[in-house]
């Protein structure tokens, strides 16, 4: 059995989760301070990928990063391409899983007691220290939930990924595209195996979250 | 010790416009909720920015809009005790107390300072606990210890006792007063509780709808509040509009009486106030009255009465009689002494 799809799926999900984590908390923190109208518009725009069909997201990504598009052509000059490469899988996963992180982080930050930040400031703590050690610590449950949801979503991503990077065995194949490909070509037994692997990973992820939450409460 | 505060800030519901200079050790700002107390503290601490103003602490300018000076809260050396203490729940008591020394790598020095502070605040044995495992009083002392560790030049207390049960409140007020007496920096406390201000503060200012009409020695303020809003805040129940008839005579139309006074009455007086426990049967100025009910309180009776010719649309007058002095037959004629009449004016 060829293990490449597992490795590819996990690295895409892991890298995109890290990107989504920083992007999500940065934008959640930044947008919360903007005027109401601008906040509303950005909120809609950033949450859109959550409700749009992933294939539509994939379509938009192709329109922006396609090899004949200005941005795609510009990036190609530096040897970067998101079309038919495994790195494109990261892009697709980031776009699709971003709203999950952003929404949960926004929610956590909104219920955060601003007095804790004020207390930190009057105690002479730097703003960066307050953000990372006080605000993030107070909001960690929401943040962790956001990362895990984003990771799980990225791992299961199919629609945008298949449009952007297709299915090339040993190159762009992920678990979800492999399952589809195997089923389409009548290799039911192998498809079933990949389904079980996917189930196992998802179960481990969710169990980890539950254990983390219990550990915090004790 | 000196503090100069001039703040002007437009807010959605009112305009904060306070101006005071103070050298007392323990200052209290007394005001109803929504009068701008917390906003004043936040401006002093640098957590909110005034539209215009000047704030200086011991000669050090913290804020000056004309010279474009606006020190960050970190640079101001102003400690802030929040109503809910704002303890960091993910850190132990020891970590909370030492947080302002987070850049200090000298573990030995930190341990020594922590030990001293735990002893001073009577928190020995609590250092490994988390804030939510402490009692309300211990939480407050932890928050105070954390602030004192950062050696502020000014300490701000935002309704520090409001979150506590009443039986704990008096005990902690005494403890806090003792702790802070030994502490050389200036303290400003805001509260809506007149007893708290009276017990703890050397100087008291009264905040009314964003304005600060009176600021003086606490005892003096309670003797002569000067303003209607101040009289109400120090707990004067009976306040009524008056018209000066001459320099020694006041007409109280609502109550249907005239008051003759030995001392000269300033012509800008618009109201008088008489505290509920200042009425009695052997007083200088006596009037016939009728009774309108009474209520037994913990240590006293609250009796409601009206003067004989009192206007029907004016409210009953409150008389508080200590339970021990309560009689079954209350007198038909009662009164008050001239010195107990608070001469008040409305804020312009």
Image: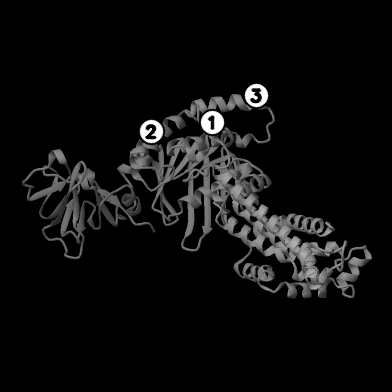
Give the crowd class for mark 3: few <14, some 14-19, many >=20 residues within 10 Å: few
Q: Comparing marks 2 and 1, which lies closer to the viewer? A: 1
- Residue at horizontal 52 percent and vertical 28 percent from the top: B118
Same chain assignment for discs 3 and 2: yes
Quadrant of the image containing the C terminus of chain A: top right
Same chain assignment for discs 1 and 3: yes
Query: Could you tell me how far apart the alpha carbons at marks 2 and 1 are, in whole angstroms?
Result: 24 Å
Q: Could you say where residue B38 lies in the image, as x and y percent from the top left?
A: 48, 50
- Residue at horizontal 68 percent and vertical 67 percent from the top: A46
Residue B58 vertical position relative to residue B29 in the rendered view, above or below:
above
Q: Comparing marks 1 and 3, which lies closer to the viewer? A: 1
Asked if residue A23 shows in the view, the reply is no
Query: Could you tell me how far apart the alpha carbons at marks 3 and 2 are, in whole angstroms?
Result: 33 Å
Residues marked 2 and 1 touching at CB (< 8 Å): no
Residue B243 vertical position relative to residue A213 in the rendered view, above or below:
below
Give the letter of the chain under mark 3. B
Give the crowd class for mark 1: few <14, some 14-19, many >=20 residues within 10 Å: some
Q: Could you say where residue B127 lies in the image, as x and y percent from the top left?
A: 54, 31
- Residue at horizontal 49 percent and vertical 45 percent from the top: B82
Q: Name the secondary structure under disc 1.
A: loop
Q: Could you say where residue B23 lies in the image, as x and y percent from the top left?
A: 48, 37
Q: Name the secondary structure under disc 3.
A: helix
State left or right for residue A29 relative to residue A86.
Answer: left
Residue denoted by label 2: B174
Q: Could you tell which of marks 2 and 1 lies nearer the N-terminus?
A: 1
Colour approach in the figure: one colour
Which is nearer the eye, A3 or A46?
A3
The disc placed on residue B108 is: 3
Give the letter of the chain under mark 1. B
- Residue at horizontal 80 percent and vertical 68 percent from the top: A187
Residue at the left extreme, as displayed = B329
Residue denoted by label 1: B127
């Amino acid at each position: 059995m060829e293990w490449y799809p597992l490795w590819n799926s996990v690295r895409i999900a892991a890298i995109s989760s890290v990107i989504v984590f920083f992007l999500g908390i940065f934008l959640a923190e930044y947008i919360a301070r903007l005027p109401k109208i601008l906040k509303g518009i950005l909120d809609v725009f950033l949450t859109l990928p959550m409700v749009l069909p992933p294939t539509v997201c994939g379509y938009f990504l192709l329109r922006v990063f396609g090899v004949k598009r200005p941005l795609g052509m510009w990036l190609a000059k530096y040897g970067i391409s998101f079309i038919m490469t495994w790195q494109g899988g990261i892009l697709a996963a980031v776009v699709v899983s971003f709203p999950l992180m952003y929404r949960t982080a926004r929610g956590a930050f909104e219920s955060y007691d601003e007095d804790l930040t004020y207390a930190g400031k009057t105690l002479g703590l730097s703003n960066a220290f307050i953000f990372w050690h006080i605000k993030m610590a107070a909001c960690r449950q929401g943040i962790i939930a956001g990362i895990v949801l984003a990771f799980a979503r990225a791992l299961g991503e199919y629609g945008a990924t298949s449009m952007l990077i297709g299915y090339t065995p040993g190159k762009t194949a992920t678990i979800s595209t492999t399952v589809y490909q195997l089923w389409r070509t009548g290799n039911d037994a192998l498809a079933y195996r990949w389904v079980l692997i996917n189930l196992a990973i998802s179960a481990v992820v969710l169990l980890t979250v539950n254990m983390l939450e219990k550990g915090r409460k004790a | 010790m000196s503090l100069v505060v001039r703040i002007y800030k437009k807010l959605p519901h009112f305009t904060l416009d306070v101006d005071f200079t103070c050298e007392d050790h323990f200052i209290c700002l007394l005001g109803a909720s929504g009068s701008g107390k917390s906003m004043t503290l936040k401006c002093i601490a640098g957590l909110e920015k005034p539209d215009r103003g000047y704030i200086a602490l011991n000669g050090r300018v913290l804020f000056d809009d004309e010279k474009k000076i606006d020190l960050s809260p970190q640079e101001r050396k102003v400690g802030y005790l929040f109503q809910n203490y704002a303890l960091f729940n993910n850190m132990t008591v020891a970590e909370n107390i030492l947080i302002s020394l987070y850049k200090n790598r000298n573990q030995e020095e930190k341990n020594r300072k922590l030990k001293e502070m735990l002893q001073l605040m009577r928190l020995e044995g609590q250092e490994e606990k988390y804030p939510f495992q402490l009692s309300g009083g211990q939480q407050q002392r932890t928050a105070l210890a954390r602030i004192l560790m950062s050696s502020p030049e000014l300490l701000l207390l935002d309704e520090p006792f409001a979150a506590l049960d009443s039986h704990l409140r008096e005990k902690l007020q005494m403890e806090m007063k003792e702790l802070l007496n030994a502490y050389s920096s200036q303290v400003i406390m805001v509260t809506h509780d007149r007893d708290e201000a009276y017990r703890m503060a050397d100087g008291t200012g009264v905040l009314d709808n964003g304005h600060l009409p009176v600021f003086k020695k606490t005892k003096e303020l309670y003797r002569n509040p000067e303003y209607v809003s101040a009289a109400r805040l120090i707990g004067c129940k009976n306040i009524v509009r008056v018209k000066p008839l001459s320099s020694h005579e006041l007409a109280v139309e609502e109550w249907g009486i005239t008051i003759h006074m030995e001392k000269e009455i300033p012509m800008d007086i618009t109201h008088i106030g008489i505290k509920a426990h200042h009425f009695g049967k052997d007083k200088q100025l006596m009037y016939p009255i009728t009774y309108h009910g009474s209520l037994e309180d913990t240590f006293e009776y609250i009796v409601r009465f009206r003067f004989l010719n009192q206007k029907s649309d004016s409210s009953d007058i409150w008389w508080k009689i200590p339970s021990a002095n309560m009689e079954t037959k209350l007198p038909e004629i009662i009164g008050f002494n001239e010195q107990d009449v608070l001469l008040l004016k409305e804020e312009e």
